[in-house]
């Protein structure tokens, strides 16, 4: 068989938000480097980054209760919330730099201001939310957060949720007006359009079948053109595997020791979507509740205002599901083929530990539309079945690995980057808060993979991200500057509608 062979500096696998971000950062830092992208689907941002395949929340820990844990002594640990908020600020600064540089236009096409709220019911939960509010609102990153357990105030904030509600139990909410709704699909496509203008070679309908090390230390990829069936060989000094759920298989094929003893647990998602303008107009916020016992953190119920294709709609969910596929467009054999001799014990240990999660997922799969409507009515008591349709959202693969804290086969919730010891290959695994923290995560990849260049790149990185290497929480002057400048550049000063 004839093979064509191409050499390049950097190969990015997968045309999602992570590859788009890393490619954009590298093109700003070293414009002369050759970058090649392979995506097995026909367009950019079609899997996890697609606007219908994620919640579109600009994750800044303003509303997500699972980022603030109540400790045994009753105090609230806000360290994770601080980390995620600071990481989202990094994304906002980078996007602002791109808008100011005319590399991104019309920021309203990918980001809009939208209040972020947490909502709880029951005395114990209201007590938790009060403590959480006190802990967060004392922190400069969360200034402007409001708390209310007053029904009249809540009716003003969330009329759709409060209508028809029997007030048998205490209810409370927090609200931060500076939250955002982000269309990661649009953002991904805009970034790739820009990369194409900078001579980045983007190959759609190209599937990476194998990856191996050559004798001279380069990485060689065996890539199939899905139209012609032709096999191409491409070599690069650095490879980033950003193929969503498909990353684990490619990491395993690379043979790097860091990819051993790691497994993947697939979780799918479903949303209920409302397109009745009369109902949609009564809600303007992302409202997050508490996850049910046994539910994974990605299944925290939330009612979201979304802006997709310049249309305002409401989404409720996500309802979790289980499929052995690692990608929405993946194979039913993905889970089975990911089990290798080096991770089988890790996978079995996770299976034994996560029986309650497995049971929960099976129950979720079996739900009828009416049962899903009953869950929705816990948020919107007056919801009518005819106003809501079911949308299949994206596929997530949670990382399973052996950890000191959790022991063998510990299920990880979050975003994880696996990098080879020499930095020549990196793979992104895991799920939320993923896209929101893409810039921070990709800067970490750059740090680990190109340490020899960091000194010469530092000035440019600080131009793009003024808070680089600085804690915003500990530098309130810079925090105020960053908040003000990003809000102006990204057009985040929309007035919230007043409900009559």
Image (tube, helix red, strand yellow):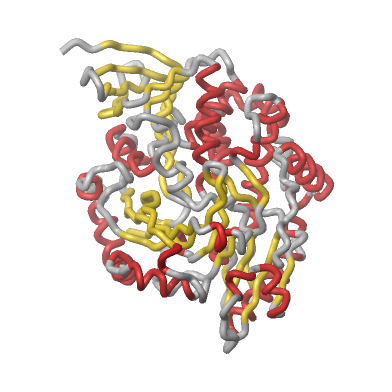
Q: Is residue 288 left or right of residue 138?
A: left
Q: Is residue 239 above or below residue 307?
A: above
Total marks shown come to 0
Q: Where on the picture, by quarter, is residue 403?
A: bottom left
Q: Nearer the viewer, residue 455 or 145?
A: 145
Q: Residue at x 48, y 62 (%)?
A: 316
Q: Residue at x 32, y 44 (%)?
A: 327
Q: Residue at x 35, y 18 (%)?
A: 235
Q: Position of residue 27 (x, y in %)?
A: 57, 21
Q: Is residue 352 left or right of residue 302?
A: left
Q: Where on the picture, by quarter, is residue 413?
A: bottom left
Q: Residue at x 29, y 58 (%)?
A: 322
Q: Position of residue 247 (x, y in %)?
A: 35, 39
Q: Give the farthest residue toward the right.
A: 477
Q: Look at the image and tell me in which quarter the C terminus lies.
A: bottom right
Q: Position of residue 130 (x, y in %)?
A: 68, 76
Q: Give the farthest residue toward the left.
A: 1
Q: Is residue 79 visible?
A: no
Q: Where on the picture, by quarter, is residue 102?
A: top right
Q: Nearer the viewer, residue 494 or 433?
A: 494
Q: Position of residue 405 (x, y in %)?
A: 44, 62
Q: Is residue 135 visible?
A: yes
Q: Is residue 81 above or below residue 380?
A: above
Q: Is residue 331 left or right of residue 180?
A: left
Q: Look at the image and tell me in which quarter the N terminus lies.
A: top left
């Amino acid at each position: 068989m004839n093979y064509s062979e191409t050499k390049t500096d950097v190969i990015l696998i997968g045309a999602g938000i992570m590859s788009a971000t890393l490619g954009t950062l590298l093109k700003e830092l070293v414009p002369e480097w050759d970058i090649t992208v392979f995506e097995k689907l026909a367009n950019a941002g079609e899997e996890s980054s697609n606007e219908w395949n994620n919640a579109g929340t600009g994750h800044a820990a303003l509303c997500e209760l699972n980022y603030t844990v109540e400790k045994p002594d009753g105090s609230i640990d806000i360290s994770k919330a601080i980390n995620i908020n600071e990481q989202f600020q990094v994304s906002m600064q980078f996007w602002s730099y791109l808008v100011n540089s005319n590399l991104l236009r019309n920021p309203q096409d990918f980001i809009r201001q939208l209040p972020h709220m947490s909502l709880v019911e029951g005395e114990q939960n209201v007590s938790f939310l009060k403590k959480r509010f006190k802990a967060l609102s004392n922190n400069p990153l969360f200034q402007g957060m409001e708390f209310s357990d007053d029904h009249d105030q809540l009716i003003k904030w969330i009329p759709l949720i409060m209508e028809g509600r029997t007030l048998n139990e205490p209810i409370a909410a927090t609200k931060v007006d500076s939250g955002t709704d982000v269309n990661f699909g649009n953002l991904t496509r805009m970034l790739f359009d820009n990369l194409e203008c900078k001579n980045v070679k983007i190959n759609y309908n190209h599937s990476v079948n194998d990856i191996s090390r050559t004798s001279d230390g380069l990485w060689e990829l065996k890539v199939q053109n899905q139209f012609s069936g032709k096999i191409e060989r491409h070599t690069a000094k650095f490879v980033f595997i950003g193929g969503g759920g498909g990353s684990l298989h490619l990491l395993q094929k690379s043979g790097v020791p860091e990819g051993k003893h790691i497994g993947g647990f697939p979780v799918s998602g479903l949303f209920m979507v409302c397109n009745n303008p009369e109902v949609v107009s009564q809600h303007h916020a992302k409202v997050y509740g508490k996850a049910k016992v046994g539910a994974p953190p990605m299944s925290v119920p939330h009612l979201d205002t979304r802006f997709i294709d310049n249309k305002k709609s409401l989404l409720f969910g996500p309802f979790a599901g289980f499929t052995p596929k690692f990608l929405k467009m993946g194979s039913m054999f993905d889970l089975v083929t990911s089990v290798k001799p080096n991770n089988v014990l890790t996978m079995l240990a996770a299976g034994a530990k996560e029986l309650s999660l497995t049971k929960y997922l099976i129950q979720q799969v079996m739900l009828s539309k009416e049962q899903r409507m009953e869950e929705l009515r816990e948020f919107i008591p007056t919801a009518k079945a005819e106003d809501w349709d079911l949308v299949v959202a994206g596929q997530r693969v949670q990382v399973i690995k052996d950890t000191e804290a959790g022991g063998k086969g510990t299920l990880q919730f979050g975003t994880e980057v696996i990098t080879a010891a020499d930095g020549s290959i990196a793979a992104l695994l895991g799920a939320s808060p993923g896209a929101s923290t893409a810039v921070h995560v990709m800067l970490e990849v750059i740090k680990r993979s190109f340490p020899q260049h960091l000194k010469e790149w530092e000035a440019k990185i600080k131009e793009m991200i003024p808070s680089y290497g600085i804690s915003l929480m500990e530098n309130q002057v810079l925090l105020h500057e960053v908040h003000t400048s990003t809000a102006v550049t990204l057009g985040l000063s929309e007035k919230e509608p007043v409900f009559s």
